[in-house]
Amino acid sequence: MELRAKVFAVEKVFQTLDEEIAKFQEGSSLHCKFGCGKCCFKADIEATTLEFLPFAFHLYQSNKASEWYEKLKASDAEICLILNPAREGAGLCSEYPHRGLICRLFGYSARTNKYGMRELVTCQIIKTEQTSAYQKAEIQIEAGGNIPVMSDYYMQLHAIDFELTQDFYPINLAIRKAIETVVHYYAYR
Ligand code: SF4
């Protein structure tokens, strides 16, 4: 698949996911605290290369790929470099439309536990500050209610590109690898 087509395919998956999340949020009334972004400060967030391909493609198109590549290469930060702690508004992500799959899934998706049951993957803030909505959502999920399932979405990305979804890397390395993929692709064309 041509790189641009791959980017569009990933964006299509993201769009479906965003719609599914919006429905889940509406039904459960679970929501993020305004201006929060605390989950993005976790140091061990991992991602695949493919989920940051749209971001890398966007950088390439705006002639910012080299600048970002060097910035990522020079940094040993464990926290996502796209995060802007000084940002004002609804969240701290400086590239929200191009965020990765994990950034979209966390908070409003389910994983399947070892007993084969789906359980909501969300943060402590939502669990403690929206306890009754959280408990209600858990019951609905157990009863088969609709919620995006993490593994389903990883499978969808896997179907787009096996190689770029095979390994999980610390988030900044995943972004760097996505930029490398885009730059190498166009360097040979
Ligand atoms: S998921 Fe939780 S920690 Fe992350 S932005 Fe939303 S409220 Fe904040």
Image (spheres, rainbow, N blue to C red):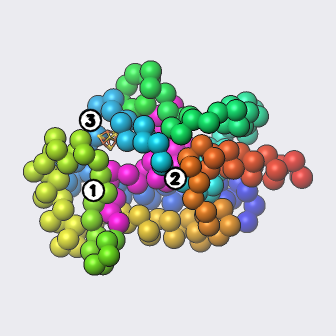
Q: Amino acid at mark 1?
A: Phe
For label 2, the crowd category at 10 Å Cα-Cα, with few meaning under 14, some 14 to 19 and many 20 or more, is: some
For label 3, the crowd category at 10 Å Cα-Cα, with few meaning under 14, some 14 to 19 and many 20 or more, is: few
**Residue drawn at 38 percent across, 51 percent down:** 106
Outermost bottom residue:
115
Helix, strand or loop under label 3:
loop
Helix, strand or loop under label 1:
helix
Q: Which mark is residue 33?
A: 3
Helix, strand or loop under label 2:
strand
Q: CA distance from mark 1 to mark 2?
A: 24 Å
Name the side, left or right, on which 18 lies relative to 57.
Answer: left
Q: CA distance from mark 2 to mark 3?
A: 23 Å
Ligand 1 within 8 Å of the CB at mark 3? yes
Mark 1, residue position? 24
Nearer to me, 132 or 25:
132
Question: Is residue 20 highlighted in magenta?
Answer: no
Mark 2 or mark 3: which is in front? 2
Q: CA distance from mark 3 to mark 1?
A: 16 Å
Name the side, left or right, on which 135 lies relative to 20.
Answer: left
